Amino acid sequence: MALHNDLLEQAYHLALREPRRPRQASLRRAVSSAYYALYHLLVHDGTRVLAPPNPGKLRLQVRRAFAHSDMKAVCQQFALGDHTKLKSGTQNLVDTPIEAQLASVAEAFVTLQEQRHRADYDVSRPLSRFDVLQKVDLVQQAFADWNAVRGTPNAKVFLAALLLQRHWNR
């Protein structure tokens, strides 16, 4: 099984681990695992689209080049669902309209990255199992939405933009 699927499974496991009184550590790690499940899904598919299978080490290098902050910036643009809100280098590559499922995946990425930061760094606010399961379910839905659009031209532009957009407007 691919890492992203394992991480999503782990997120559910951690969210449901203690049946009566879930530990904050389990809930916080569930949010983090959920975010990383979506991150690794996009990086996996981006690498598959952008790098040939041989030599194998090339794909590993490309995987390492994806940056969380760059990915968030691209996702914030795609989440709006409006091609006119994309940076010009990306805007010229996108077919209109941007699919609702693609915008949903982008929005989920932004939301989950912010929630992961809160879960990891803001320990003053306790998490509830209900809220954590909603976040994990959001990633599950993002996986489904991604499966619906992953082969589209816009999805391929999206994946390339996650890695390259900051270089396109130079």
Image (spheres, helix red, strand yellow):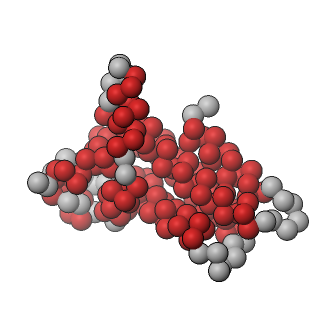
Tell how many labels: 0
Residue at 24% x, 51% y is 165
Residue at 33% x, 49% y is 162
> Looking at the figure, which quarter contains the N terminus?
top right
Q: For this view, does 101 lie left or right of residue 5?
A: left
| Quarter assignment of residue 155 | top left
Question: Residue 145 location in percent, x, y?
Answer: 49, 49
Q: Is residue 154 visible?
A: no
Q: For this view, does 144 lie left or right of residue 86?
A: right
Instruction: Give 61 or 116, whichever is nearer the viewer.
Output: 61
Instruction: Give 133 or 63, whichever is nearer the viewer.
Output: 63
Q: Residue furthest top?
A: 54
| Quarter assignment of residue 32 | bottom right
Q: Residue furthest left?
A: 170
Q: Residue furthest right?
A: 20
Q: Residue furthest bottom?
A: 124
Question: Residue 70 location in percent, x, y?
Answer: 33, 56
Residue at 11% x, 54% y is 170
Q: For this view, does 11 lie left or right of residue 141?
A: right
Q: Is residue 58 visible?
A: yes
Residue 97, above or below 40: below
| Quarter assignment of residue 73 | bottom left
Question: Residue 11 location in percent, x, y?
Answer: 67, 52
Residue at 69% x, 72% y is 127
Question: Residue 6 location in percent, x, y?
Answer: 63, 40
